[in-house]
Amino acid sequence: MPDDNYGIDSTPLGSRSKDQDTWATNQKTNSEEAKESRAAREKERLLWEEEERQKKIKEREEAEKQRLEAERRALYAELESLDYDLLSLLDFPTDHELYAAKRARTLWFIALGSALFLFLASLLSLTSPWVGGIAGGIAFVLWLTHGAGMMSYFPSLNRYPALVTQRKRLKRDLIEYIRNLEGRLGYMHRIYPLVEYNPRLGSRKFKRLALMSKEHTLLANLRTLQDTRAYHEYMVEALRGYQEMLQQEKEDKFVESMDFDPDLLEENAQQKNNADQQTKEAEQATEEEQETSASSNQDTSLFPPKD
């Protein structure tokens, strides 16, 4: 008898639906696991990118810090090559020198005018010839002092203008030197951190100059000799601070090169002090006991021994 049901699935309908539900559940579970895995990988990737970004930021900050430190050290090193003679206006003529030169010029004019007047008066027979001859000789000598060779011995007409010209030239050279030194970024406020090694830089007048240097108004406020003198004092104090910084760095390197710990030395010194103090206290206690025993022996010796 032929099999009429050949090729037809003989699995029950309930079992087939159960298998489909299981397959669907497995597919759903696998898809959820895949999503969770992708989410975890995406989270790890974001964390890695954030770590790399923070690492690059720290590297850039460290490189910028090293660059600024190297630039600051170069600025500090420039303090040793400054023209302190120009900053201090060492060859600047004083007011006393100008007054003396001006007075000498006035006296020169009076003496020359008087000698010429007497010489001309003798030619007109207003005075005796010998007076005119003497006056003419004096006028000739005064005229010779007008030359540059006699100027150091007899200050004459050229002395006062020379001092005035020298003053103007030194002022112009000083302002130009400070302008080149300050530059566009300012020099004074960039070396102000040396106040850590020289507290004198923290005075009010130096703070005012450093602030003007930062605001690029320093050259406009350097109008008097007191201002330029304060600028020179600032540079001298900054140089002292730089030298103190170098000395401290040498001392720190010396300590680091040794095979001991400075903190350990302090602890040993403290322990030694404590031990010395305890020894002194023990010695004092021993002396007190000896004095007590000696006084007790003296008290018992007052009573004679009984036979």
Image (spheres, rainbow, N blue to C red):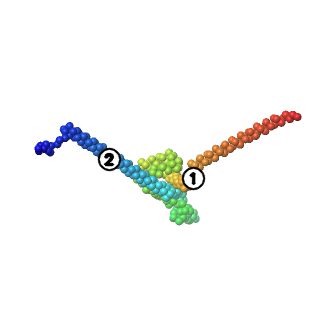
**280 vs 238, nearest the viewer:** 280
Q: Position of residue 2 (x, y in %)?
A: 11, 44
Q: Position of residue 216 (x, y in %)?
A: 41, 50
- SS of the residue under disc 1: loop
Q: Which mark is residue 260?
A: 1
Q: Say what amino acid the circle numbered 2 marks.
A: Arg
- SS of the residue under disc 2: helix
Point out the frontmost of discs 1 and 2. 2
Q: Which residue is mark 2?
A: 41
Residue drawn at point x = 68 percent, y = 44 percent: 279
Q: Position of residue 268 (x, y in %)?
A: 61, 48
Residue drawn at point x = 27 percent, y = 42 percent: 29
Q: Position of residue 79 (x, y in %)?
A: 49, 56
**45 vs 112, nearest the viewer:** 45
Residue drawn at point x = 87 percent, y = 34 percent: 306
- Residue 148 showing in the rendered view: yes
In the picture, which quadrant includes the N terminus? top left
Residue drawn at point x = 54 percent, y = 56 percent: 257
